[in-house]
Amino acid sequence: MSRGANNTTNTDPSHAKMVESILPLLGLRGVSPLYGFIGSWLGLEPSLLLTALGMIWAFNKLSRQLYSYMHAIVVQHFMSSVHIRNPDDIYTHLIKWLATQPRLVNSRSLMAETSSKEAWEDEDASNVTRDKSGFYLNFSNQEAKSPAQYVPAIGLHGFWWRGHYFTLTRKREIVFAEGSSRAFREHEDITISCFWRSPQPIKQFLAHIKEVYYSNHQARTIVKRPSRLSNPRYGGRGNWLQVANRPVRDIRTVVLDEDQKLKVLADINEYLHPETPRWYANRGIPLRRGYLFHGPPGTGKTSLSFALAGIFGLDIHVISLLEPSLTEEDLSGLFASLPRRCIVLLEDIDTAGLRRPPPVKPEDDDEGGGPAHAPRRSPRAHTNNNNAAASTTNTNTNATAPHDWKVSDLARALKKDDKSEQRTGISLSGLLNAIDGVASHEGRVLIMTTNLPNQLDDALIRPGRIDLQVAFTNATRDQARELFVRMYEGDPRPRRRGKAATTTSSSTTATGPPKGGDEKAVENGSAGEAANVMETDGLDIRMAELPEVARQFSVKVPDGELSPAQIQGYLLKRKKHPRKALEEADAWVEGLMKQKVLRSNVLEVQ
Ligand SMILES: Nc1ncnc2c1ncn2[C@@H]1O[C@H](COP(=O)(O)OP(=O)(O)OP(=O)(O)O)[C@@H](O)[C@H]1O
């Protein structure tokens, strides 16, 4: 007998018949033969199978609901969370920390990132190869050699830290950026949670990663610029983005009149003192301090700003008012989101076009006049205006020409265009509002630099906005001597010496690759020479001679004619050769003076 026939005997025929008679009533007449077939083939009542499947489905549904209910209770009563938004600093700290903890975040879903080194990061000289001649350094395949770094990908991850289990959820969302850019942008958000009724373990964890980050960044100056991402909280751009992290500039390397330097240092030191806010508050004075560094190009204005940031351990926030997409709203948002103590650097403020515009002539004013501080003109707008003006003049002089009305119409149209452009960008009043309006940030140090102090609007530099002016001048003879000594004196830091580069050459000459003199002596194995190297530090003079050579050099430099940047540039080209620098100084100075007279940009002697 067939298997099917055998199985049919195992089913309850009365029950099967009952189901088969119900199916036509339910309109499932065609199903009853199938029902009978399945029953006989499986050897059991199909309704039992259906019941079992239904129970599994119901159990699954129930357990899922129970799980989400329990999860909600656990999250609500036993878990804490902290959200971190990009581009907040903590986000950067966390991602950097996670990248260094491959074992901790034991996830199978990772995001690989290229880990490029920053310009100022220490490198092991032994990892740098040279070309076949052994003369030139070669950095080919540099990126290929650096290992990728891995961070948790978008999604849910878990990790243990100091006895606590944390979950990390990384999310990405697309948001519409309000403000000047008005575009869709990506935002990332990380949520860290832990099984604890208070967020204390998360706070400790975040404090730890912050500490780790800054322990690696001591003696560094962090430079920030406005981020292109908008911050919805401020309805526009209010975020700062770290763009550089460079070694602190030693204030001694900025050659400046010592009294001026000390005056600025003492002033900022007093201003940053923790008791100063109360003193200011008691007298109703806004807690702000502004400095104007003015002088010719290359005289150390930016250098001093960085040195001050290094001394006081402050971050530098650099704003360029010429950035076309920066609006007044953005500027207010940026000032509002500054940290408690920091330096805000507004460079070359004279070029930002913030002067008050001349009063508008009634005939020019199609829209019935403007505000006292009309918005600034962008350089393009200015050109347009000049063109427009030129066109208008043309129109007047050729009043009889048959198609003049078209030219003047065009000029007027351009002018209108120009006026609509004026409404973008930063106006003087917008800047003044941002730096010391009622809602403006207090506690920051504001430094403005300019080459042309006399072209600045009085309102911008009035006391209260600018509290101290520091004049920078071309180098005096004494300063030239100091620059010379600083260039050639020994390196104060212990020299990090890697093993010799992978390819070496015996054909190294005096003009060859930059090798420290002590390295040469070690190669030659001569103790006498090593001692000599100590005396010369690889220079073409002995260290003891340096002050006298510097003095002789300074005599050749005309007082107050050359900028420190020019002197530095000349000496840099003779990095190991102070004697040569002294010998060639006359020709160099003569060339520069000639260049000045001819108003040429071409250097004869460099
Ligand atoms: N007083 C100085 N002491 C030491 N180095 C200086 C000094 N002035 C200029 N330099 C050097 O010249 C270069 C340019 O200097 P810096 O950018 O500070 O000049 P600046 O006055 O800000 O110029 P600009 O007005 O063109 O912005 C830097 O490399 C700096 O090291």
Image: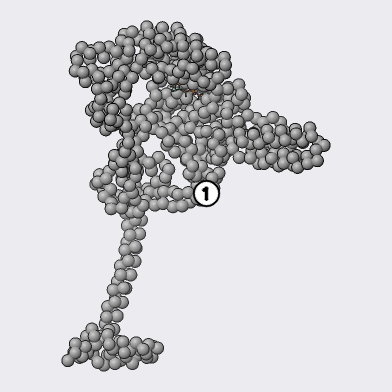
85 vs 431, left or right, is: left
Answer above or below: position of 404 versus 553.
Answer: below
> At which x and y percent is residue 242?
42, 36
Q: Is residue 69 visible?
A: yes
Q: Quadrant of residue 575?
A: top left
> At which x and y percent is residue 141?
31, 38
* Amino acid on which disc 1 is placed: Ala
Q: Who's the residue at 37% across and 90% down the image?
A: 29
Q: How many marks?
A: 1
399 vs 307, left or right, is: right
Q: Who's the residue at 45% across and 18% down the image?
A: 606
Q: Who's the residue at 54% across and 36% down the image?
A: 323
Q: Quadrant of residue 219?
A: top left
Q: Residues within 10 Å of mark 1 (few under 14, many from 20)?
A: few
Q: Is residue 125 visible?
A: no
Residue carrying label 1: 183
Q: Who's the residue at 44% across and 35% down the image?
A: 224
Answer above or below: position of 66 versus 575.
Answer: below
Name the colour scheme. one colour
> At which x and y percent is residue 515?
29, 22
SS at badge 1: strand
| Quadrant containing the N terminus in the rendered view | bottom left
User: In terms of depth relative to the viewer, which is nearer, 512 or 320?
Assistant: 512
